[in-house]
Image (cartoon, helix red, strand yellow):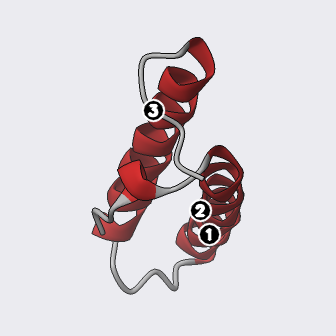
Amino acid sequence: MKKDYKKMSTTELTAQRDKLRKELLDLRMNKVVGHLDNPLALRNVRRDIARLNTLIHAQEIGIAKVSK
């Protein structure tokens, strides 16, 4: 689910990160219950959250350009 995160603004990145965090919580709850269809989805969502955190941090410290 690699997307064009580099083209997003900081507010869009944080909104996407919050959405993915909620999705991760839902996946973890489904794993506990035992109804997880795709176990690799947990890994993919965690990695997407890490990508977003990296881009947000890079924009905050001025390494990456902020899109508007």
How crowded pointer 1 is (Cα within 10 Å; few <14, some 14-19, many 20+) is rated as: some
* Residue 3 appears left or right of 54: left
* Residue 35 appears left or right of 16: left
Q: Residue flagged by tag 3: what amino acid is it? A: Lys
- Of the numbered discs 2 and 3, the one sitting upstream in the chain is 2
Contact between labelled residues 1 and 2, with CB atoms less than 8 Å apart: yes
Callout count: 3
Q: Residue flagged by tag 2: what amino acid is it? A: Leu
Q: Name the quadrant of the N terminus.
A: bottom left
- Of the numbered discs 1 and 3, the one sitting upstream in the chain is 1
Residue at point 33%, 79% (across, down) = 38
Q: Position of residue 10 (x, y in %)?
A: 64, 44
51, 60: nearer the viewer: 60
* Residue 25 appears left or right of 8: right
Q: Which residue is mark 1?
A: 23
Q: Which residue is mark 3?
A: 65
Q: Position of residue 43 (x, y in %)?
A: 34, 54
Contact between labelled residues 3 and 2, with CB atoms less than 8 Å apart: no
Query: Dot 2: what SS?
Result: helix
Contact between labelled residues 3 and 1, with CB atoms less than 8 Å apart: no
How crowded pointer 3 is (Cα within 10 Å; few <14, some 14-19, many 20+) is rated as: some
Query: Dot 1: what SS?
Result: helix
Q: CA distance from mark 2 to mark 1?
A: 5 Å
Q: CA distance from mark 1 to mark 3?
A: 28 Å
30, 65: nearer the viewer: 65
35, 2: nearer the viewer: 2
Q: Which residue is mark 2?
A: 20
Q: Nearer the viewer, mark 1 or mark 3?
A: 3
Q: Which mark is residue 5?
A: none
Query: Dot 3: what SS?
Result: loop
Q: CA distance from mark 2 to mark 3?
A: 23 Å
Residue at point 53%, 69% (across, down) = 31
